């Protein structure tokens, strides 16, 4: 595939800003997506749904530019036809069967009645819902409803698929099934964006993640790179188990990179540092200086979940 073809299939936002009155929906968001699955994580109210509405052409940015599949979704209907938006809210008729709901959607997209019926059957098969297809949609579980939305996206001819909180309220078996469908979408060469307020749900799907808080994109890239770039920006709480923690605590207090020291129990000391890499690097020197044997080094602040928690909190304080 040529570079031009790849760009024409992708998504690019450049300094996109959206306001709801005086409230900032998105603030100068720049983002490029390629075919495959990408995740956007952020707390509720962070701007995830607004981002997707901009990408579908439902909301025009006040500032900045957006290009999807080589065009602007707000002004180009041909671009909008190639985008599937699976919202967190309900989007099917409660009184119709699952199969009939699908037929209505396919006919609305311009397919004939016969073709719509064929595609509806195919979507039910892909989503594992064939035996439930004739049941009234209002009787379906949350997991079944989400699977139907993804089945619709898989059968359709759209190239960009936007999934807003697809795991919300879904039981574990359905969640596993949904993950398989989402991976299938990405493997088919489509550009898939999945939003969630739960980080581990996105980590289970992709290693490409963006972190959004209060309308601002605070970090974006592959998870390993995000960790390298962001983990030194927030304080770490490191716990050491040793044979003489009081001597160890005295040595730690003297370090300029240590801001707090606490004796947890008779054989355990905990310290807070804003320079975790320096802390880990100097542990051998600390052992040599004090003569204290350190048996265990432990922290819960070194993973992406901790990074997510800290930088979203920091982003909130800056606004």
Image: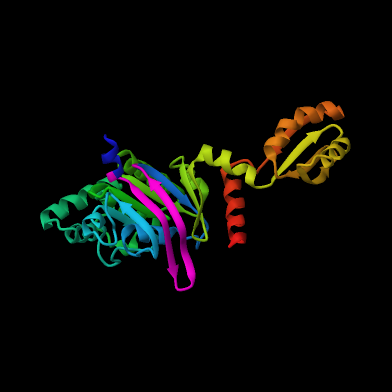
* 30 is within the stretch colored magenta: yes
- Viewer-nearest residue: 307 or 199: 307
Name the image colouring.
Answer: rainbow
Residue at 45 percent of width and 55 percent of height: 29
* 121 is within the stretch colored magenta: no
Find residue 104 and report its image quarter: bottom left
Residue at 19 percent of width and 61 percent of height: 108
- Viewer-nearest residue: 195 or 154: 195
Q: Is residue 295 above or below residue 314?
A: above
Find residue 18 and report its image quarter: bottom left
Q: Which quadrant holds the N terminus?
A: top left
Residue 87 visible in image: no
Q: Is residue 113 left or right of residue 178?
A: left
Q: Which quadrant holds the C terminus?
A: bottom right
Residue at 51 percent of width and 40 percent of height: 223
Q: Is residue 292 left or right of residue 189?
A: right
Q: Is residue 304 left or right of residue 272?
A: left
Residue at 12 percent of width and 58 percent of height: 113
Give percent across and percent down for residue 200. Answer: 51, 46
Q: Is residue 95 above or below residue 164?
A: below
Q: Which residues are magenta?
A: 8-35
Give percent across and percent down for residue 122. Answer: 21, 47
Judged by its main secondary structure, the magenta piece is strand
Give percent across and percent down for residue 275. Answer: 70, 41
């Amino acid at each position: 595939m040529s570079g031009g073809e790849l760009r024409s299939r992708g998504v690019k936002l450049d300094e996109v800003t959206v306001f709801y009155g005086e409230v900032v929906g998105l603030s100068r968001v720049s983002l490029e997506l390629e075919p495959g699955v990408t995740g956007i994580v952020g707390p509720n109210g962070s701007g995830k749904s607004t981002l997707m509405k901009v990408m579908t052409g439902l909301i025009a940015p006040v500032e900045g530019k957006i290009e999807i599949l080589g065009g602007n979704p707000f002004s180009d209907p041909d671009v909008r036809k190639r985008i599937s938006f699976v919202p967190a809210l309900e989007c099917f008729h409660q009184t119709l069967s699952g199969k009939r709901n699908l037929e209505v959607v396919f006919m609305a997209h311009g397919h004939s009645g016969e073709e719509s019926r064929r595609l509806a059957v195919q979507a039910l098969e892909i989503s594992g819902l064939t035996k439930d297809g004739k049941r009234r949609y209002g009787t379906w579980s949350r997991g079944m409803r989400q699977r139907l939305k993804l089945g619709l996206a898989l059968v359709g001819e759209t190239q960009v698929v936007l999934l807003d909180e697809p795991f919300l309220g879904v039981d574990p078996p359905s969640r596993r099934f949904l993950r398989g469908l989402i991976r299938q979408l990405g493997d088919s060469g489509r550009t898939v964006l999945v939003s969630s307020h739960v980080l581990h749900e996105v980590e289970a799907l992709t290693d490409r993640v963006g972190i959004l808080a209060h309308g601002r994109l605070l970090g974006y890239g592959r998870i390993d790179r995000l960790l390298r770039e962001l983990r030194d920006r927030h304080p770490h709480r490191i716990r050491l188990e040793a044979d003489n923690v009081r001597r160890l605590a005295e040595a730690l207090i003297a370090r300029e990179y240590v801001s707090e020291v606490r004796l947890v129990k008779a054989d355990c000391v905990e310290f807070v540092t804003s320079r975790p890499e320096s802390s880990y690097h100097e542990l051998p020197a600390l052992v040599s200086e004090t003569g204290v044997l350190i048996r265990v080094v432990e922290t819960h602040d070194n993973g992406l979940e901790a990074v997510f928690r800290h930088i979203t909190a920091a982003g909130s304080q800056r606004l």
